[in-house]
Image (spheres, rainbow, N blue to C red):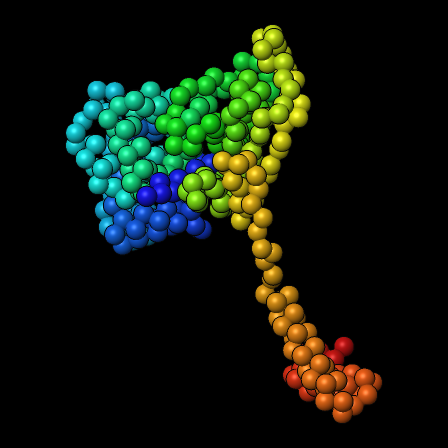
Amino acid sequence: MPSGPLMIIGGAEDKVRKPTILKHFVALSGGPDARIAVIPTASSLGREVVDVYDALFSKFGAARVDAVRPESREQAHDPALVKALDEATGIFMTGGNQLKLSSIICGTPVGDAILRAHDRGAVVAGTSAGASIQSSHMVAFGVGGATPKQRMTQVAAGLGLVDSTVIDQHFDQRNRYGRLLMIVSQSPQLLGIGVDEDTCGLVEDVDGDMVMRVLGKGAVTIFDGARMTSNAYEAKRSSPLLASGVIFHVLPEGAVFNLSTRTLVPQEPVVAGEDAEELAEATRDLRQLVRDIAAADAAPAAIRRRLALRRTRSTPPTTPDQGDPS
C-alpha cells in the first residue's frame, strides 16, 4: 500500500479569503469522513490555536477534530494520545517552535504513531514548524540572510517522513536562503527545500518515487548540492562559505518535482480560456477550408471571401454609444 500524502506548508496559510491549502487537506483526509488530529505542541498559544483549526476543519466538512498536545516526552507516551493518532485519517501539526516539537515527539509513541499513520495512507500535514519536522534533518533555529555563513544555523533530527532532506519555511519572506544553503554545503547529500508562506509542497508516492506538486501563491525553492564544491569543512566561524555547482530550482504553483530522482517533471502546457476559444475557432475554419478544397467547388480567393463573410455574420452587431455625442 502506498504511503499517505504529505503536505509541507510554509506557514501563514490563508485561513479566511482563499483557504485553498486547508480545504485540500480536509478533502485528502476524507472530506465528510475525515477524522483529524491537530498537534499544537510547537505553539506557545493555548487552547485557542486548536479552536481555530477545529472551526476551520469542521467548516470544510471534517467529521471530527481532536487535539493531541503532549507537553513533555512523558506525555508523549500517553496511550490516549496515541489512540487518537491511530484513528486519524489526517494529522495536522501547527507552527511554533520546531525544536520544542521535535524534542518532545521524535522517538516517542506519539512520534511512532505519526509514522504509522503515514505508512497506512493517512495525510500528514504541517505548517511552519510542522513542515520542518517532516524532513530527516530539521532547521532547529538560526538567523536569516542571503549569504551562507558558517554556523549561522543549527540542525536537529526530524521525523524523517521525507528522507534525505532538510526543510525550511517562511522561506522568501524571512530571507532564509543562506541558512538552508549552509546546511546543504555541510551535507551535500541532503536536498534543501525552502517553502514560502501560504504555499504547500504536496508530496505523494508515485510508483515508489516521492513526487511533490506545488500549491499556493508562493514558490518552493530547492537546493541540490549532490555535485557541489564547498569549503564548509575548513571555513572559520561566521565566515561566508564557498558553494559552487549547486543546482537551483524555483517551483511555482503547478510545478511538479520528483524528490527521489531530483528532477523536474514536465507538465502539459495550460491554454488560457480566451486562447482556447480562438484556437477552437481557427480549427473549425481550417476544417471547413479543407472540406471546400476537397469539394473543388471554388477557387482559394473565393474560399477566403466565404470565410470572411461567415465570420462577419457570426459577429454580433455592436450597440451605438447612447452617451454624450461630444
Residue that protrudes farthest toward the left in the picture:
80
Q: Is residue 210 visible?
A: yes
Depth check, front residue: 64 or 323? 64
- The part of the image, by quadrant, that contains residue 229 is top right
- The part of the image, by quadrant, that contains residue 105 is top left
* Left or right: residue 134 compared with residue 194: left
Depth check, front residue: 304 or 317? 304
Decide: is 304 above or below 30: below
Residue that protrudes farthest toward the bottom in the picture:
297
* Left or right: residue 293 compared with residue 224: right
Instruction: Identify the residue shown where x is 44% and y is 45%.
Output: 206
* Image quadrant in which the N terminus is located: top left
Residue 89 place in picture, x, y as percent: 28, 44
Instruction: Identify the residue shown where x is 25% and y is 41%.
Output: 88
Decide: is 35 above or below 144: below
Residue 184 place in picture, x, y as percent: 55, 23
Q: Is residue 50 visible?
A: no
Residue 95 place in picture, x, y as percent: 38, 32
- The part of the image, by quadrant, that contains residue 41 is top left
* Left or right: residue 236 compared with residue 139: right
Decide: is 287 above or below 278: below
* Image quadrant in which the C terminus is located: bottom right
Instruction: Identify the residue shown where x is 39% and y is 28%.
Output: 160
Instruction: Identify the residue shown where x is 58% and y is 29%.
Output: 224
* Left or right: residue 154 compared with residue 94: right
Residue 207 place in picture, x, y as percent: 43, 44
